[in-house]
Amino acid sequence: MERNIRLNWQLLVKEAIKRRKEQKISQRRLSALVDISQPTLSRFEQGRQDIQLASAIKILGALGLIENDA
């Protein structure tokens, strides 16, 4: 069965930035926590969609926007 799932990428990015700043976590610290490069996190926060899905999931999970089952 095919599913058509649409994400509001800009809204996810905006909320992720908001949560990171509320928690007073720098980009450098968050990237270290989730084991991605700081430039990757920066690209994510710029709303660019050219990052790996696994990296986006790590960022969103660390900020409590999705549940990580792993």
Image (cartoon, helix red, strand yellow):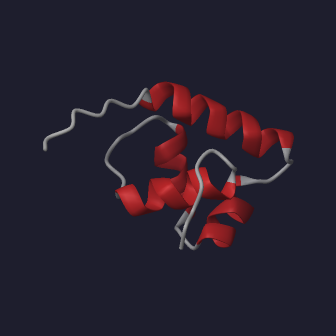
Picture quarter with the N terminus: top left
**Does 6 sit above or below residue 42?**
above
Residue at image location 75% in from the left, 40% down from the top: 19
Residue at image location 54% in from the left, 48% down from the top: 42
Q: Quadrant of residue 32?
A: bottom right
Q: Is residue 40 visible?
A: no
Extreme residue in the left direction: 1
Q: Quadrant of residue 58?
A: bottom right
Residue at image location 68% in from the left, 70% down from the top: 33
Point out residue 57 in the picture as x, y percentages from the top left corner.
Answer: 49, 56
Q: Quadrant of residue 27?
A: bottom right
**Does 57 sit above or below residue 49?**
below
Name the one closer to the observer, 51 or 69: 69
Name the one closer to the observer, 38 or 21: 21
**Does 32 sit above or below residue 9?**
below
Point out residue 41 in the picture as x, y percentages from the top left corner.
Answer: 54, 53
Residue at image location 64% in from the left, 32% down from the top: 15
Point out residue 17 in the picture as x, y percentages from the top left corner.
Answer: 67, 38
Name the one closer to the observer, 7 or 14: 7
- Using residue 57 as the reference point, say whether residue 64 is left or right of it: right
- Numbered marks: total: 0
Point out residue 46 in the picture as x, y percentages from the top left corner.
Answer: 49, 36
